[in-house]
Image (spheres, rainbow, N blue to C red):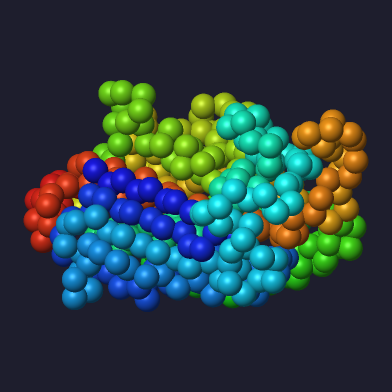
Amino acid sequence: MLRYLTAGESHGEALVGIVEGMPAGVPLTAKEINRHLARRWLGFGRGGRAKLERDKIHIYSGVRFSKTIAGPIGLRLDNAAYRKDKSGWPEVMSVDGEGEDITRVTLPRPGHADLVGAQKYGFDDLRPVIDRASARETAMRVACCSIARQLLKQFGIEVGSHVVQLGEVGWDHEADWRKRREALIVEGAENINDLADRSEVRMLDEELSRVCVDHIKEAKRSGDSLGGVYEVVVTGVPPGLGSYVHWDRRLTGQLAQAILSIQAQKGVEIGDGTANSRRPGSQVHDEIFRDDEAVFRRRSNRAGGLEGGMTNGMPIIVRGYMKPIPTLIKPLETADMITGETQPTRYERSDVTSVPAASTVAEATVAWVIANAFLERYGADSLEEMVVRFSATSRV
């Protein structure tokens, strides 16, 4: 099965990743990974680092002549802030020495991992927590998971996303954005990305995008931050991925874990999850029919493409709920970790909102889960063998 590890700190020299378990023969170039890394910087309301970083991946191993060779794939992503920023990061994040002259960070931010992380690991300086808990880590996650997307692509499986709500601004009528989404995914989920990526906030409606930009500007003037809701869609998925036989093999649980593993995510919804909890069963369950080609299908997709922890052949619909970023220009009160003195927390450079960016990170983590489930069912040592197995399996 697929595994990946990331290493590195937000202001360290680089982020490093290792991807293991990818079959041989999957087309892979740095260009394709870099495309998704660039999409991770999309969105109005990003902070100064968005202007500084120009993420470019370096593939060290596991690929030969633009195809995977079944060995571990080694990746490196340099942090431009480490060299270009004038904050002395090579000294602050030095691997060597004792750090005697480095100013300790002792004011934890409310809503951040700062304080709890320091308590857990026994730090008297919050910097190690700040730098590893940072969402900068998702850059390497996107790089690793983009390799899984390349595998899915060989079987016509596409992953897309868009922002549904940003702060207080969203679609007045849920049916409107659902209708827009359904029209786009007929030809595959990447059509959603084609439209969403043109918006400053990755929304599918131009007018809503403009309102969101104004909302972000107002939040910035107020020294505040914004959360929101996004949706990830996967098309071309065959039925039968995942399993109902053990709790940890249910794809619904794996997808929820993937979303909640992303920094600042606080909720997950699959299909019409929250709305279905208020409706009678007659308005929830998707009726089944068999088409002219003897393929079983659903007349609707309120289940979001998943039943009993397994894919049912319909598009997978997963929504993520992100809280506002905890770093505020207008600070909240906190207590100094050493003295206990109450005072306004320090400002750590950040965004007003990164919901649009989170939607692209969620695409990546969802793609990884689907690729793993796909390998579980159709896995082989090479792409060529996987194609044979996939083609020989009934999809009805």
Taking the spot 74% from the left edge, 51% from the top edge, the residue there is 103
In the image, taking residue 310 as reference, residue 389 lies left or right, namely: left
Residue at 62 percent of width and 61 percent of height: 91
Q: Is residue 154 above or below residue 135?
A: below
Instruction: Report if residue 78 is visible in the image.
Output: yes
- How many marks the image carries: the answer is 0
Q: Is residue 191 left or right of residue 60?
A: right
Q: Is residue 389 above or below residue 32?
A: above
Q: Residue at x 51, y 27 (%)?
A: 281
Q: Image quadrant of residue 153? A: bottom left
* Image coords of residue 76 (percent x, y): 40, 64
Residue 158, image quadrant: bottom left
Residue 384 point in image, percent of width and height? 11, 61
Q: Residue furthest top?
A: 246
Q: Is residue 165 left or right of residue 358?
A: right
Residue in the picture at 66% in, 71% down: 85
Q: Pick the quarter of the image with the N terminus.
A: top left
Q: Is residue 142 above or below residue 196?
A: above
Quadrant in which the C terminus is drawn: top left
| Residue 140 vs residue 159, the one in the foreground | 140
